[in-house]
Amino acid sequence: MNWTWLGLAVLVLLAFSMVDGYRHGFVKEVVSALLVLISVALVWLINPYVNQFIRENTSVYEKIQTASGSFVDSLADGKETMDEEEQKALISSMDIPDLLQKGITENNTALVYQYLAVNTFAGYISGYLANVAVNCLSFLVSYILSSILIHVLAYAMDLLARLPVIRGINKIAGAVVGGMKCIVFVWVGMLVLTILCNTEIGQKGLGLIRGDTVLDFLYDKNIFIRIFTGIFYGG
């Protein structure tokens, strides 16, 4: 089992969240987690519109694609054409989690090339990474907006302040829910690193994830990234 400082930090955060959940109790943690789930549900409603807005009204996609293109060109050593083995070797040389490598490999088809309007392997990878980054970014923006709305409503109702605290099993169950809530936040943090996959900090972060057994497992199970690595999401 491999460990990195980032993986240890996530485990400390998970332990802290479980202790905090134990302290607050099951009822409060369930309501708090429920607010997070409601926020995620709202995301699915507004995210397609946010995604479309980012693609049509900002230059984010183009900038990420350009930056990703430079990153891929540096790995390809200037080669414009590659055979299948060379393509696999280039993908394997990218210091990104296996889930992203798998997505790049599985979507390396003529249909996706047509969808991305590219005709080279380097153009495909830069377009794929840009597409994934925009999908993740739109989700993150949507999540922030929905979270703000939910917490404003919760504060107005003073819902959390009036809930009773039940001890014993309530606290243990609260620790479990607190840990689950922490994992959702870690998944969102991994989304941010995926958005920044073509930057130095993003590459270092994804490299740490790939080199850490726990983080690589959490990344592989990240339901948000599994959805957004689909090339046709939000298209």
Image (tube, rainbow, N blue to C red):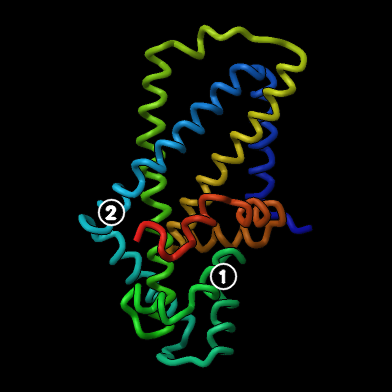
The image position of residue 67, as x and y in percent, is 36, 69
User: Type of residue at label 1?
Assistant: Gln
Give the quarter of the image for residue 180. Answer: top right
**Sequence-earlier tag: 2 or 1:** 2
The one of 34 and 179 positioned closer to us in this rendering:
34
Q: Is residue 73 visible?
A: no
- The quarter in which the N terminus is drawn is bottom right
Return the mark for residue 186: none
User: Type of residue at label 2?
Assistant: Gln
Q: Secondary structure at mark 1?
A: helix
What residue is drawn where x is 59% and y is 17%? 28
What residue is drawn where x is 41% and y is 32%? 147
Left or right of residue 124: residue 16: right
Left or right of residue 128: residue 215: right
Q: Looking at the image, is 29 positioned above or below residue 40?
A: above
What residue is drawn where x is 60% and y is 54%? 219
Residue at mark 2 to residue at mark 1: CA–CA distance: 26 Å
Q: Residues within 10 Å of mark 1 (few under 14, many from 20)?
A: some
Q: Looking at the image, is 91 positioned above or below residue 231?
A: below
**Residue lying furthest left:** 57
The image position of residue 136, as x and y in percent, is 43, 53
Label 2–label 1 contact, CB within 8 A = no
The one of 92 and 169 positioned closer to us in this rendering:
169
The image position of residue 212, as x and y in percent, is 69, 57
Give the quarter of the image for residue 205. Answer: bottom right
The one of 125 and 207 positioned closer to us in this rendering:
125
The residue pinned by badge 2 equals 52
Q: Secondary structure at mark 2?
A: helix
Q: Is residue 228 visible?
A: yes
- The quarter in which the C terminus is drawn is bottom left
What residue is drawn where x is 67% and y is 61%? 211
The residue pinned by badge 1 equals 101
